[in-house]
Amino acid sequence: MNVIDLSTEISGLQFSSPLMTASGTAGYGKEFLQAPCPSLGAFVTKGISLKPRKGNPPPRVCETSCGLLNAIGLENIGLEAFLNEILPFFSGENPPLIVNIFGESTQEIVEIASRLSKHQAVKALELNVSCPNVRAGGIAFGKDARILSALIRDVKSKASQPVWVKLTPSVNDIAVIAKAAEEAGADAITVANSYTGIAVDIEREEYCLGNITGGLTGPAIKPLSQYAVWQVVKEVRVPVIASGGCASARDALEYFLLGARAVQIGTMALVNPSIFDEILDGLEEFFKRRGIPSLNNWIGRLK
Amino acid sequence: MIRVSDTYDPLLNRPFSICYADSSHNTIAVVYQVVGKGTLMLSREKPGDSLAISHPLGRGFPVRQSERTMPILLGGGIGIAPLLSIFSTNRSFAEKARVFWGIRGKADFFDFKMVDESLSGLPLSLSSEDGTIGEKGTVLELFLARVHDIRDLNVAPIVYACGPTEMLRPLSRICHDQKIELYVSLETRMACGTGYCLGCSVPSSEGKYLRTCREGPVFNAASLSWEQIHECH
């Protein structure tokens, strides 16, 4: 066996690799893809809102045991600048572009979706209804199945591309939310986002983050995210994209075994820029050793 | 950024400034103080050990070629380390420098020639808060006592500073009032070091955020909003 097939299909799109950037950890792509990254199946942008956002006051990051607590606050350049400055960069040479979008109102999100739907370079939209770090926008939509369903229907009616929905794990039952998203028309579900947390400084008697609360990511959350993936794959038939603390080929293999069709890597790519190459090599090596011809033969084998 | 461990705890790479670079020997020197878990692990490395490093990142101190320019290095504690880098980026410019260094006490002192032989014998004005070495007082007091003499030399001083925010904030006011150009090297909590995570942002005087890792760590002091900049803990 010479070539292992590591491609994966999600919402009618074929990806040469099952590895993606996690939104917010690799910018908009223009800088990140200066050096070609063939091991990347898709590039998922930082969340884009209709208008630029300034973000939260510092300190915005705090290291915790095996994890990173962040409260960036969805700082981004806004849709207009994204369309003018970033989109022209994405051509055939680059990995498929997935644009992560969010907003404070249904109207705002629908407008972003409808304007992006005109652009062929945008292969799918990832709807962020799960950022824990801003009061209005995002997570409010992701915690209520009814509100989320209505939002997804509205976005789907305007979007020409597949719509992926990135869920928050900070809910009572993520399977219920995922099922509602699927029924409303979500083409894939990203499981999950960061977990809300706090870090405290006893010397200064102060919170470590300017925003007080932040989202926990990194290896610390992997078992929690795997639990969320496990719950969701049992409930929905649309593809599940895993996101949460993936740091190695082994971690990715675990997620695939649970039934995820792709894995997003965020925090660990901040630490190790060559992680995508290393994980893809690791997957190939593992499948060769085990005599498994393709990733598809491995996905969801753990019932 | 230096990877201090192969495990997930500590998770992040650590940002350090380059103190000295020797292109003929392909070496860099980093001077650091053990303050936490990461620096403690780093201090346990032995000669000959290898470390994953991504460098150089961000922007360093700008160099002025004008004859009249006099660089003034103003370091608080371990903040002296990045300032010395101008001796390896532009030696002839740096030769004209006056060096002011303030430390808490004798225990914080190190001889610059430990970094590189060529750094011995610099014109150093030293102060310590407890008076155990150099003049008793802060580096700002030391600088203020000399600034008029420097003015009298009919030179254009340009100050390069690094140290705690409680030193940099009043310094920015002093330099603003005296119309002296000031560049500061900032320290912030940092995750990626490459501009993607937006974790190390500091407030600018224009009401925006600037990334310490990309637009900095060296900033023109006038471009920052000092009342909103806090100590890095």
Image (cartoon, grey):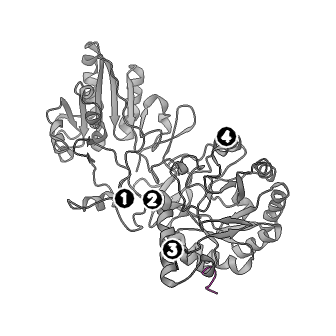
Label 4 with label 1: CB-CB less than 8 Å: no
B95 left or right, relative to A114: left
Q: In which quadrant will I find the C terminus of chain A?
A: bottom right
Q: CA distance from mark 4 to mark 3?
A: 39 Å
Q: In front: A293, or A166?
A: A293
Q: Earlier in the sequence, mark 3 or mark 2?
A: 2
Rate crowding at label 1 as few (under 14), some (14 to 19) or many (20 or more) other CA atoms within 10 Å: many
Residue sticking out furthest to the front = A2
Q: Residue at x 59, y 54 (%)?
A: A24
Q: Residue at x 47, y 38 (%)?
A: B215
Q: Image quarter for residue A235?
A: bottom right
Q: CA distance from mark 4 to mark 2?
A: 28 Å
Q: Amino acid at mark 3?
A: Glu
Residue that carries the numbered disc 1 in the rendered image: B3
Residue that carries the numbered disc 3 in the rendered image: A284
Rate crowding at label 2 as few (under 14), some (14 to 19) or many (20 or more) other CA atoms within 10 Å: many
Residue that carries the numbered disc 2 in the rendered image: A271
Can you tell which of label 4 and label 3 is closer to the viewer? 3
What is the chain identity of the residue bearing mark 1?
Answer: B
The magenta stretch spans residue B45: no
Label drawn at residue A81: 4
Q: Amino acid at mark 4?
A: Ala
Residue sticking out furthest to the bottom = A303
Rate crowding at label 4 as few (under 14), some (14 to 19) or many (20 or more) other CA atoms within 10 Å: some
Residue A61 on image: x %, y %: 50, 54
Q: Earlier in the sequence, mark 4 or mark 2?
A: 4
B75 left or right, relative to A22: left
What is the chain identity of the residue bearing mark 2?
Answer: A
Residues rendered magenta in the picture: A298-303
Residue B2 on image: x %, y %: 35, 55
Q: Dot 4: what SS?
A: helix
Relative to residue B186, is residue A144 depicted above or below?
below
